[in-house]
Amino acid sequence: MKGWLVKELGEPQDALQISKMEKPEPKDGEVLINVKAAALNFFDILLCQGKYQEKPPLPFTIGSEVAGVAVKTTVGSRFKEGQRVLALPKLPNGGLVDYITVEENSVYPIPDSMSWNEAAALFITYHTSYYSLTNRAALQEGEVLLVHAGAGGVGSAAIQLGKAAGAYVIATAGGSEKTKICQELGADVVIDYLKEDFVEVVKKETNGKGANVIFDPVGGNVFDRSRKCIAFDGRILVIGFAGGEIPTIPANHVLVKNYSIVGVHWGLFNRLNPDKVFKEHEELMSLYEQGKIKPLIYKEYAFEEVPEALDLLASRKTWGKVVVKVWL
């Protein structure tokens, strides 16, 4: 079989090579998957560069989200051979290969109605957003949800999940193309932060009350400004720091305005509560089959185009998820 190997650290164009590899055999508790599609993430670039928090030994394969067919299982498996699945391979054996073995607790069923690209693009973004809004923020029907970076992976998922929960969704994005995407995803109000002050718009739309829940994967100044339009008893979800700057939090302001700063570490939740994650996956699959969620895909790339796709991802000019067609 073939796969993309990082044989030496560097930029994706230099670090990645298509190489012949041995087809793996599943051990007890593993599933052998014929990979059909894989999603790329920004941390794949950092892995190639040797700048990610995890530094697997060379050579290694990137690709943390895949979709495909379970072609071989072991005794007692909850999966059947021929079943359609998505999976989260673990380093150093990533998913940009023909075949991959993955531990069963990182494999999840998908419906026949879901495309390979959608399945590969769904897991991390939708699970993060679902856990954030449902578990951490306890978003209620009729509440106002402000989603920052609404055209991004987790942001686009949060818009759809917020609407599915019955919230009034306000989304921010930069530029006409991305604001249009947020509108198409179902946001009730879309703010182009390049032209408008989202604090003023949120206050206007809520008659000065502010947003009940703010979904923030950006951090920095966006977080600081969000504190100015959070409602009484509101919850600001700290998803990440895509803006690069980690903000500080003045405790007196939290007290005076009576709101909560809520951390979201979905990866740790996944490790500690795999059964709960599996249950949430079933709920997400139900929402998909009801037509309430649909992964936002920027573009499908051919297997040979992985370095070019990662270069584009590095430019931060994409929206939604970038996926790779893996079957050769």
Image (cartoon, grey):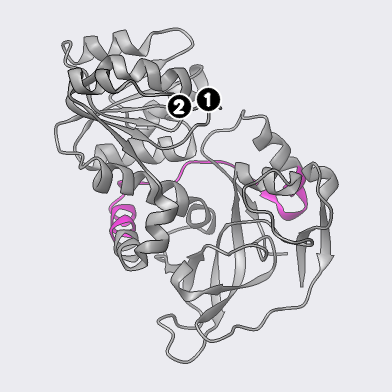
Name the amino acid, label 1.
Glu
Residue at horizontal 49%, vertical 32%?
A: 241
Quadrant of the rendered structure where residue 25 is? bottom right
**Tag shown at residue 245:** 1
**Tag shown at residue 322:** none
Residue at horizontal 30%, vertical 63%?
A: 276
Residue at horizontal 32%, vertical 68%?
A: 275
Quadrant of the rendered structure where residue 193 is? top left
Residue 229 in percent (x, y) is at: 27, 16
Using the image as rendered, state which of residue 24 and residue 269 is in the foreground: 269
Q: In the structure shown, which secondary structural element does the residue marked by tag 2 occupy? A: loop
Residue 310 in percent (x, y) is at: 70, 42
Left or right of 250 on screen, residue 120? right
**Residue 113 is at least partly visible in this image:** no
Whether tag 2 and tag 1 are in contact, CB under 8 A, the answer is yes
Quadrant of the rendered structure where residue 273 is? bottom left
In this rendering, is residue 180 above or below 36? above
Using the image as rendered, state which of residue 168 and residue 299 is in the foreground: 168
Residue 45 located within the stretch drawn in magenta: no
In this rendering, is residue 175 above or below 181? above
Residue furthest bottom as drawn: 75
Using the image as rendered, state which of residue 236 and residue 181 is in the foreground: 236
Residue at horizontal 79%, vertical 72%?
A: 21
Query: For the magenta stretch, what is the residue range?
Result: 283-307
Name the amino acid, label 2.
Gly
- On-image quarter of the N terminus: bottom right
Which residue has dot 2 on it? 219
CA separation in Å, label 2 and label 1: 6 Å
Using the image as rendered, state which of residue 308 and residue 253 is in the foreground: 253
